[in-house]
Amino acid sequence: MNVGLIIIGDEILSGKRRDGHLAKFIELLGQRGMQLSWAQYLGDDRAALTARLREAFASGDLVVSCGGIGATPDDHTRQAAAAALGRDMAVHPEARELIWQRIQQMAAEQGKAVTPDEPDSLRRFEMGRFPVGAAIVPNPYNKIPGFFVDHVYFVPGFPVMAHPMMAWVLDRYPQLHREVQTLERSLIVQGAMEASLTPLMERIEAEFAGIKVFSLPSVDHPQWGRCIELGVKGEAEGLPAAYAALKQGVIDFGAQVSAEMVR
């Protein structure tokens, strides 16, 4: 099962807020021996969200979507998810109860009385209106839940809420956790063009099952100037032999190895 991340919000695309999710999600995956397969940033456009979420539901991937699940006019994710599924929306009973607990808690802190049928309460209950058949993702920060349908999960845009909810999602899939984590070994190559090393990269991937070769060229690296970071990544068991073959291939080509790195 591939793992994907969708990050939603005009404020991210405009630069008003910096994304805090991608790096954290990769970290959470790595702690469980998992890897991110893809990620995508989307604006608050209901039609575009509906189209992308329709693809996500059909993909079979494990997908986490961050942002846009509030109840203000610029939040479209809940409605887009329902449209993508072709389902109506309804206030989830458990979500409503959790939101009501939060409303009461906030009122008590302010020394105010509150009822469930007053306008502010009714507006907050809208945050629990999900596609019919959805289940909730618990929010340990303030109780207002996210939701999920099949393998697509929806959490808030606030990192302080989203990150523990992401961890909860990943822990629902212990069958995807791996004790053997993916590692990387790479070297800095000078005196060779990326195209010239492509046959070597193709040979390494063909000879070593489960190993991926990567190439990151630079024209103005602060330490090595024009260079290529050339490396392999995969499970620890098969990595040393693949790396040794890659390094020897660079040497045989006549290029210079300026540094070696392990991650």
Image: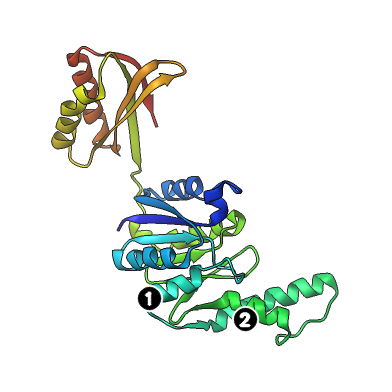
Residue depicted at x 61% and y 55%:
160
- Which quadrant would the N terminus be assigned to in this image? bottom left
Q: Amino acid at mark 1?
A: Leu
**Distance of mark 1 from mark 2, alpha carbons?**
25 Å
Secondary structure of the residue carrying tag 1 is: helix
- Which quadrant would the C terminus be assigned to in this image? top left
Query: In screen coordinates, is 121 left or right of 4?
Result: right
- In percent of width and height, residue 129 lies at 54, 78
Q: What residue is shown with label 1?
A: 85
- In percent of width and height, residue 116 lies at 71, 85
Mark 2 closeness class: few <14, some 14–19, many ≥20 residues within 10 Å: some
Query: In screen coordinates, is 92 left or right of 243?
Result: right
- In percent of width and height, residue 172 lies at 42, 64
Residue depicted at x 40% and y 51%:
39
Secondary structure of the residue carrying tag 2 is: helix
Camera-side residue of 11 and 190: 11
Q: Earlier in the sequence, mark 1 or mark 2?
A: 1
Q: What residue is shown with label 2?
A: 97
Q: Residue furthest right?
A: 111
